[in-house]
């Protein structure tokens, strides 16, 4: 964690105009009034990319067949791997919103799908996601057979890999621009603020 | 920077693997990307076994003789030692689940 301030300007909702306002409006329409995350405020510096990325994220989270709980658990694990404290709070909050317990969020942070109330398929896909993220070339035909035998479809392979890609992309974006956590997040904010304070010296 | 103690020097290596507690030595190098990717998986595994297992790093490029002695042919190579003896090894990326399944039979049996 690098300190308290983002490296680029984050324009408040009330001051957004033009394409930036269009991006913010998209976010509020999907997530609720005031819920324009700092990450997407940063994307507001290049709003056309922000709009495209939010559309991609919305498709991933709303149109697939895999559960939001699985995808958010994978993104929580990735946030730990990528040392993105903002992202841990963000995806932990998202896990809470789909009914996950604190113990399940802790299990995602420990990369331990056995301690999350998952189906057999979800557990296998969480493991597949961790392996794909760690070294995609280490995935073997046997790994695929394990997933196929419990009903994983081609579309679900694409969906889980895209979850990994999306989590990593946003973690990189937030880390490289030092984007801080949103004030509407609820998960592990004491932990987040303690780390932020320590980084600030 | 790794979260694990460094035992690249021969003396530190010998003192570490000779202990009572099982230890995973991660042979790695600074340039090895997969070595960094496996680190959080190893940290979670050590946390899961709550003191019954430790993990250390040995830089295979800085101590090539040590890596050669232990027949390290790819990075990362993870070698599980107990009381100075090699119990088993894995090469390449491992998930936390794979690591738990690997080490758990070797823990807690004296």
Image (cartoon, rainbow, N blue to C red):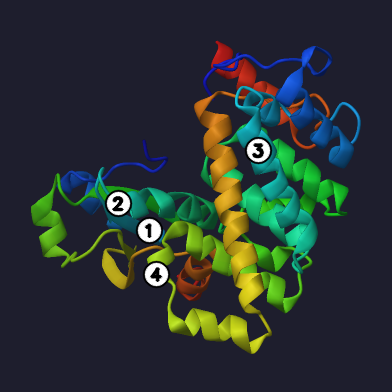
Q: Residue at x 61, y 51 (%)?
A: A77
Q: Residues within 10 Å of mark 4 (few under 14, many from 20)?
A: some
Mark number for residue A138? 4
Q: Is residue B4 left or right of residue B11?
A: right
- One can see residue A153 in this view: yes
Decide: marks 1, 2 in contact (CB < 8 A)? yes
Apparent side of residue A29 relative to residue B43 in the rendered image (left or right)? right
Element class at badge 2:
helix
**Rendered view: A157 above or below B41:** below
Side (left or right) of A8 relative to A44:
left
- The answer to whether residue A119 is above or below residue B2 is below
Q: Position of residue A176 (x, y in %)?
A: 50, 28
Residue B51 seen in the current view: no
- From mark 3 to mark 2, how far is it between C-alphas? 36 Å
Write down the chain letter for disc 4: A
Q: Position of residue A75 (x, y in %)?
A: 64, 50
Q: Position of residue B36 (x, y in %)?
A: 38, 48
Of the image marks 1 and 2, the number of the one nearer the N terminus: 2
Query: Callout 3: helix, strand or loop?
Result: helix
Q: Which residue is mark 3?
A: A87
Residue drawn at (65%, 28%), measured in percent from left and top?
A47
Image height check: is B87 above or below B46? below
Q: Which mark is residue B23?
A: 1
Residue under pointer 2: B16
Q: Are marks 4 and 2 in contact (CB under 8 Å)?
A: no
Q: CA distance from mark 1 to mark 4?
A: 24 Å
Would you call the spot at circle 2 few (<14 residues within 10 Å), some (14-19), or many (20 or more)?
many
Mark 3 or mark 4, earlier in chain = 3
Q: Decide: is A16 above or below A147.
A: above
Number of the front mark, 3 or 2:
3
In terms of depth relative to the viewer, which is nearer, B50 or A51? Answer: A51
**CA gap, disc 3 to disc 4?**
26 Å
């Amino acid at each position: 964690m690098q300190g308290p301030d983002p490296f680029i300007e984050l324009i408040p909702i009330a001051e957004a105009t033009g394409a930036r306002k269009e991006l913010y409006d998209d976010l509020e329409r999907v997530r609720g009034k005031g819920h324009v995350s700092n990450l997407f405020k940063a994307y507001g510096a290049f709003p056309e990319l922000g709009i495209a990325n939010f559309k991609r994220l919305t498709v991933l989270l709303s149109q697939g067949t895999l559960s939001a709980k699985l995808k958010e658990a994978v993104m929580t694990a990735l946030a730990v791997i990528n040392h993105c404290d903002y992202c841990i709070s963000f995806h932990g909050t998202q896990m809470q919103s789909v009914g996950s317990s604190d113990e399940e969020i802790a299990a995602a942070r420990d990369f331990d799908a056995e301690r999350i109330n998952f189906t057999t398929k979800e557990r296998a896909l969480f493991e597949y996601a961790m392996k794909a993220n760690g070294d995609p070339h280490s995935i073997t035909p046997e790994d695929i057979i394990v997933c196929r035998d419990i009903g994983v479809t081609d579309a679900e392979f694409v969906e889980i890999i895209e979850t990994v890609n999306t989590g990593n992309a946003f973690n990189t974006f937030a880390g490289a621009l030092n984007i801080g956590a949103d004030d509407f997040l609820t998960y592990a904010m004491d932990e987040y603020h303690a780390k932020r304070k320590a980084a600030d010296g | 920077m790794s979260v694990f103690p460094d035992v690249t020097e021969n003396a530190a290596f010998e003192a570490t693997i000779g202990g009572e507690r099982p230890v995973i030595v991660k042979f790695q190098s600074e340039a090895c990307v997969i070595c960094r990717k496996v680190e959080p998986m190893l940290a979670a595994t050590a946390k899961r076994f709550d003191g019954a297992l430790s993990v250390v790093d040995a830089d295979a490029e800085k101590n090539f003789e040590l890596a050669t002695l232990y027949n390290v042919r790819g990075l990362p190579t993870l070698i599980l030692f107990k009381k100075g003896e090699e119990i088993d090894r894995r090469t390449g990326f491992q998930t936390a689940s794979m690591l738990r399944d690997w080490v758990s039979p070797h823990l807690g049996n004296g």
